[in-house]
Structure formats: structure tokens, C-alpha cells
Image (cartoon, helix red, strand yellow):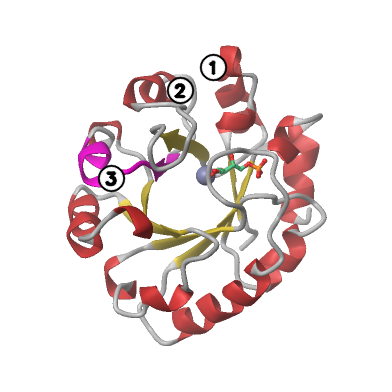
């Protein structure tokens, strides 16, 4: 199955989010990636649940909500009624990841957990049975348009071997993804690629095709 593409709408012209959502649908993407930033876990402030609802109303593409917030327990609940495909929270932001993942799953939503570039992949060893997606940050969270961190390759290898031990999960890579590294990321085990600045510059349809290797 070709890799799934989740364009990060944060990199779209922000006054035209409805058009961006429609472009993502027309380009045949599997998800719309929503980068929720609260000004605490990361310095920037981006979208909350109300803007996410407005984006969602503009297309049929399932939402992939990435919570970069200091209190994911409180924030995640605000998205339940929007029925996103995935809600991902950060390992670094919660002391009770199992409880939160179970709460998300109980709503029929895939539970994702994200790791910052400096958090060892091994922290997931006791968690894989509770989660559906691991979102590996390949840049420090906070901004689009950053350079892919090369140490992510090694982290992907470790993650892939963790997946092979049982309790399979999908691997999502977020940050600095483009046609330069997409096929190698898929070979290394990525099931979902997030892409912001690359897909929103120029012809999105062509760029998505390139990311999918079509
Ligand atoms: C970074 C966000 C990413 C980002 C991706 O904090 O989580 O989703 O918007 O953008 P690019 O593809 O430009 O790195
Ligand atoms: Zn993201």
C-alpha cells in the first residue's frame, strides 16, 4: 500500500484554510494534519478545536490532530466530537499516557503518541499495546519549514524493530519531509508522512504524487 500523506495545514496560507482543505482533498491525501500548539509546550500558538471544526467542514478528508500542548488530557477531549481519525499527544507532556490513549480509543479514534527528537524510542516499550500510531518528530516541534534531523534515521530503525516485537502500530514521520527523503522514509518503515512547507509550495497534486512515489 502506498504511503499515506498528511499535509500539515499550518504551512498553508492561514487566511485561506478552507481552500487549503479542499486542495488537500483534490490532491488525494489520506489526512489533514492539524498542528495544535498552545504557546506553552511550544512557543507558538496555532489552532484550537473551533478552527479545526471549521477546517473539517470544508472537506471530507479525515483529520489527523497533533497536540503540541502542555495539558493533552484537557485538550484531547475537545476534539472527540469532531471524530478525527487520529489524535496524537506528546509523550513528554503527560504522566498518564495509558489512560489518555485508552480514553481516545474508547471514542473509536486512533490513539497516537509523539516523541520529540531527544526522547529515546525505548520509552515506548511498555506502551505499544495501548497505541495505534507513533508520530516520530524529525524536527523539534514548534514550526514548519525546519531541516530534517539526520539522527531520525537511526530512531526509525529502532522503532521498526519495536514494531516487529508485536502490538503493531503505524509509524508517522513529521518534520522536514520532502521528495528528497520520502522514498527512503517509506523504506525505513514510515506508513504516514506529514508534509507542510514542501506540499504547500507549488502544485500540491504533483508534490503528493512525488511523496507517494507515483
Ligand atoms: C512541527 C509540526 C509539523 C510541521 C511540518 O512542529 O508538527 O507538522 O508543520 O512542516 P514541514 O513539513 O514544513 O517540516
Ligand atoms: Zn505536526
Q: State the residue at coordinates (58%, 37%).
A: 8
Magenta range is: 63-77
Q: State the residue at coordinates (32%, 52%).
A: 93
Mark number, residue 171? none
Q: Quadrant of ligand 1?
A: top right
Question: Mark 2: which secondary structure?
Answer: helix
Q: Is residue 130 magenta?
A: no
| Nearer to us in this view, 180 or 73 | 73
Which badge, 3 or 1, comes first in the chain's sequence? 1
Residue 204 spot, x, y in % from top left:
74, 33
Which badge, 2 or 3, comes first in the chain's sequence? 2
Mark number, residue 72? 3
Q: Is residue 64 magenta?
A: yes
For label 3, being within 8 Å of ligand 2 is answered: no
In the rendered image, the vertical position of residue 86 relative to residue 186, given as above or below: above
Discs 2, 1 touching: Cβ within 8 Å: yes
Question: Mark 3: which secondary structure?
Answer: helix
In the rendered image, the vertical position of residue 164 relative to residue 171, given as above or below: below
Residue behind mark 2 = 55
For label 1, being within 8 Å of ligand 1 is answered: no
Q: Nearer the viewer, mark 3 or mark 1?
A: 3
Residue 66 spot, x, y in % from top left:
43, 44
Residue 170 spot, x, y in % from top left:
47, 65
| Nearer to us in this view, 71 or 214 | 71
Question: Mark 1: which secondary structure?
Answer: helix
Residue behind mark 1 = 18
Question: How many other residues sit within 10 Å of disc 2, few (<14), some (14-19) or many (≥20)?
Answer: many
Q: Is residue 91 left or right of residue 22?
A: left
Amino acid at each position: 500500500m502506498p504511503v499515506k500523506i498528511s499535509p500539515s495545514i499550518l504551512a498553508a496560507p492561514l487566511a485561506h484554510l478552507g481552500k487549503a482543505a479542499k486542495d488537500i482533498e483534490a490532491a488525494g491525501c489520506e489526512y489533514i494534519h492539524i498542528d495544535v500548539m498552545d504557546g506553552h509546550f511550544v512557543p507558538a500558538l496555532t489552532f484550537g478545536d473551533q478552527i479545526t471544526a471549521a477546517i473539517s467542514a470544508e472537506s471530507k478528508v479525515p483529520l489527523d490532530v497533533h497536540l503540541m500542548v502542555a495539558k493533552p488530557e484537557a485538550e484531547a477531549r475537545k476534539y472527540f466530537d469532531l471524530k478525527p481519525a487520529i489524535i496524537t499527544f506528546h509523550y513528554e507532556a503527560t504522566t498518564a499516557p495509558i489512560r489518555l490513549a485508552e480514553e481516545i480509543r474508547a471514542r473509536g479514534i486512533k490513539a497516537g503518541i509523539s516523541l520529540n527528537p531527544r526522547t529515546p524510542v525505548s520509552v515506548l516499550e511498555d506502551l505499544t499495546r495501548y497505541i495505534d500510531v507513533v508520530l516520530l518528530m524529525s524536527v523539534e516541534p514548534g514550526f514548519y519549514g525546519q531541516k530534517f534531523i539526520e539522527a531520525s534515521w537511526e530512531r526509525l530503525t529502532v522503532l521498526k524493530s519495536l514494531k516487529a516485537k508485536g502490538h503493531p502500530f503505524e509509524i508517522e514521520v513529521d518534520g522536514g519531509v520532502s521528495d528528497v527523503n520520502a522514498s527512503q522514509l517509506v523504506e525505513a518503515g514510515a506508513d504516514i508522512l506529514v508534509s507542510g512547507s514542501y506540499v504547500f509550495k507549488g502544485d500540491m497534486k504533483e508534490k503528493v504524487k512525488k511523496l507517494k512515489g507515483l
